[in-house]
Image: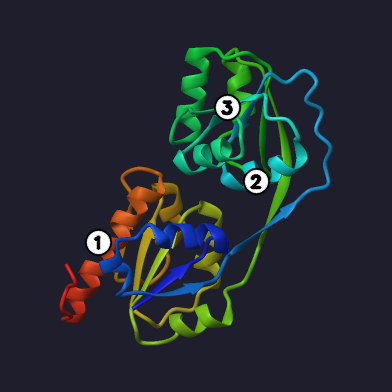
Amino acid sequence: MHLLMTRARAASERFIAGLPPEVLEQLTPVFSPLIEICPLDVVLDLSTVRGLVFTSANAVAIAGDLIQTRDLACYCVGAATTDAARDAGWPTTQSGDTAQQLISTLTREKPDAPLLHLRGVHARGEIAKNLSRAGTSCDEQAIYDQSLQPLTDAAVQVLAGSDPVVAPLFSPRTARQFAETARIRAPLWLTALSPAVAEPLETLTFQNLLIADRPDSAAMRKIVELSVKRVNRVEGRTDAH
């Protein structure tokens, strides 16, 4: 069966590398990033900033090129973003798994402010606005754009075929792009990071749609593994487990 990865190539490869070997050996990866990360030409003024907020590893990578020092505290959403910021040399705290959890945590802990949320052009949660309303001053700056991309020829081919396709979707925007552009004949097994990601996918014809119980890669890997098991049962295959 095919594993259709719609994240950026590096993030997709990290996700695949974390799958159990007995699951991975049953899957043929197909890469079709639906968003291209495009750094913006910006100059950051950090003269009054006391801490940075990151909600994606993409922002961490681009900020690393824009900021030479690593003395500002960083408050991150999710383990992957936290690990990226820590690996880049910033003093880092994971402040939640979602934007709302981060807002609640920082409102309670009251870190030194003002903060600066470095993000993409397309972002959810209105973190800076909601933090400021709650008493923790926070500004925001877009440092990259996320341009939508069509499905690759390889992705179009497997979706038009007869072999099962397991497709993890990680953001509402890529899920919407997938739902609007995919032409599906293959048996499709969808997994979604959250209910918001699952919503655009409900218009598609699919065999099954699973939603992760937490918005992180570990939970997504679990439901990809479960999807593989279910494909094996439906297809009458010997389950590698």
Nearer to us: label 2 or label 3: 3
- Badge 1 vs badge 3, beta-carbon distance below 8 Å: no
Q: Describe residue 37's horizontal placement relative to residue 200 as left or right.
A: right
Marks 1/3: CA–CA distance: 36 Å
The secondary element bearing badge 3 is classed as loop
Task: Please say if 108 is above or below 24.
Answer: above
Tell me where residue 26 sits by quadrant.
Answer: bottom left
Q: Describe residue 131's horizontal placement relative to residue 168 as left or right.
A: right
| Residue at which label 1 appears | 226
- Name which of mark 2 and mark 3 comes first in the sequence: 2
Which residue is drawn at the image coordinates 48% and 44% (left, top)?
80
Q: Amino acid at mark 3?
A: Pro
Query: Quick one: 205 or 14, which is closer to the camera?
Result: 14
Task: Please say if 117 is above or below 49.
Answer: below
Task: Please say if 26 is above or below 17.
Answer: below
Marks 2/3: CA–CA distance: 15 Å
| Residue at which label 2 appears | 61
Label placed on residue 91? 3
Q: Amino acid at mark 2?
A: Ala
Which residue is drawn at the image coordinates 76% and 35% (left, top)?
68
The secondary element bearing badge 1 is classed as helix
Q: Amino acid at mark 1?
A: Leu
The secondary element bearing badge 2 is classed as helix
- Badge 2 vs badge 3, beta-carbon distance below 8 Å: no
